[in-house]
Image (tube, rainbow, N blue to C red):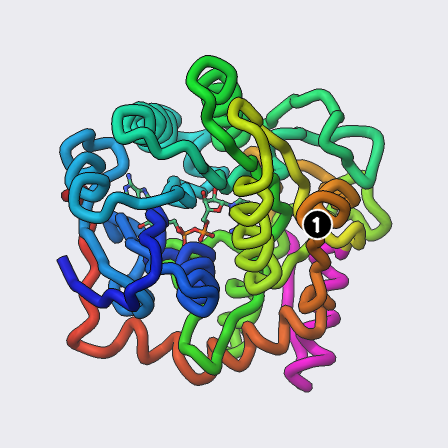
Amino acid sequence: MRENNNGGPHVLVTGGAGFIGSHVCKLLADEGYCPVTLDNLSSGHQRFVQWGPFLHGNICSANDLDHVFHHYNPVAVFHLAADIEVGNSVENPDPHYRNNMVGMLELLSTMRRWKVDKLVFASTCAVYGSPETQPIREDEPLAPASPYGHGKAMCERLIEDFASAYGLRAANLRFFNASGASPEIGLGEARRHETHLIPLALDAVLAAETFTVNGNDYDTHDGTCVRDYLHVEDIALAHFQALKALDRCERGTAALYNLSTGQGYSVLDVLKAIERVTGQPVSWRVGPRRPGDVARLVGDASLATRDLNWQPARSSIDSIVGSAWEWRRHYHGKLWSEASFTISRSPA
Ligand SMILES: NC(=O)c1ccc[n+]([C@@H]2O[C@H](COP(=O)([O-])OP(=O)(O)OC[C@H]3O[C@@H](n4cnc5c(N)ncnc54)[C@H](O)[C@@H]3O)[C@@H](O)[C@H]2O)c1
């Protein structure tokens, strides 16, 4: 355990060593909270935990969770820890569901035992599947296309049931595609097994390799998948705004909010943005579709704007690509090569 306490009220951030969780911790610390990270480092990095205590532990372990609640008495929980690989969830659903579902249930039970009643949950647009009507609103029926999406929808259901039975106050944030980085504080997207478009394409540019586009026969303007990209700092801001909203709302509330820009970019649009921002050509070829991918996901975030006073101010595609490019050029290689950097493959 590493102590680094700024004296503010403790909040638990599960997955705080990950890409989005570390940004959430930074913002919470800026706002006077002391973020406590619980993370098993299955894909996160201990060096991303800079703004509060770190516990190397597993959300699926009631003991690890009890330890955190006993030691820190958090006033609220931000739940971001999860396996996030859609393709892997299709190929190997057993460990995927075990991690994300057991973790969710253990966390909710622990919150109940310790009488902590505020939860912000990192859900996803993958709960929608591939709806006809776009931009997608929160009242769209759920039809996930992968175990990842099904698992997140089931987590939302658990949260809703705990809210109505036990008075939990929760905000389920269904965010669309997170990307971008914060090079000035050394945070960015860094997974051993990367599956996301922008980091993969930037790595291809840095290595002067050919990037593989996963399918070009989707029903979109150029045949490649269309997504709604959000800057990670905008997502962190929504987490903080959601906490403030929970302070105002009644017990037993489980609100749902899309986090999105309403603007869709195809894979080829993103590759063009990368060429524009980096000034370098992107070499690409077309490969097969990836399991679990859907053609188009663009969201309507009017509810988050109205209730959370949230705007994705940093989420222009050039700002997202530009910050990710800066971070990758200056930090990403070092993160992997420095001897002091270790990653644990086994849960604590
Ligand atoms: N990246 C996106 O585009 C996106 C979009 C929608 C939703 N989300 C959700 O946001 C959250 C964070 O995603 P991210 O992109 O930062 O991913 P990430 O892989 O960088 O972070 C996830 C973190 O959770 C940790 N973790 C996983 N299982 C754990 C366990 N059992 N116990 C403790 N820690 C565990 C990992 O080590 C990692 O640090 C996830 O819940 C994800 O489903 C992400």
The location of residue 282, given as percent across then percent down, is 65, 74
**Looking at the rendering, in which quadrant would you find the N terminus?**
bottom left
Q: Could one spot residue 47 in this view of the protein?
A: yes
Label 1: which secondary element: loop
The image quadrant of residue 143 is top right
| Part of the protein shown in magenta | 265-286
The location of residue 51, given as percent across then percent down, is 33, 67
The location of residue 261, given as percent across then percent down, is 75, 54
Q: Residue at x 49, y 16 (%)?
A: 161
Is residue 305 toward the left or the right of residue 8 in the image? right
| Residue in the foreground of this view, choosing between 229 and 287 | 229
Tag 1: Cα neighbours inside 10 Å, few (<14), some, or many (≥20)? Answer: many
Is residue 149 toward the left or the right of residue 46 in the image? right
Q: Residue at x 52, y 70 (%)?
A: 181
Q: Could one spot residue 96 in this view of the protein?
A: no
Is residue 180 toward the left or the right of residue 314 in the image? left
Q: Name above or below for residue 111 compared with residue 298.
A: above
Is-magenta flag for residue 272? yes
| Residue in the foreground of this view, choosing between 314 and 34 | 34
**Amino acid type, callout 1:** Ser
Q: Name above or below for residue 230 compared with residue 4.
A: above
Is-magenta flag for residue 336? no
* Residue designated by label 1: 260
**Looking at the rendering, in which quadrant would you find the C terminus?**
top left
Q: Residue at x 77, y 36 (%)?
A: 136
The location of residue 23, given as percent across then percent down, is 46, 63
Is the C-beta of the residue carrying label 1 under 8 Å from the nearest atom of ligand 1? no
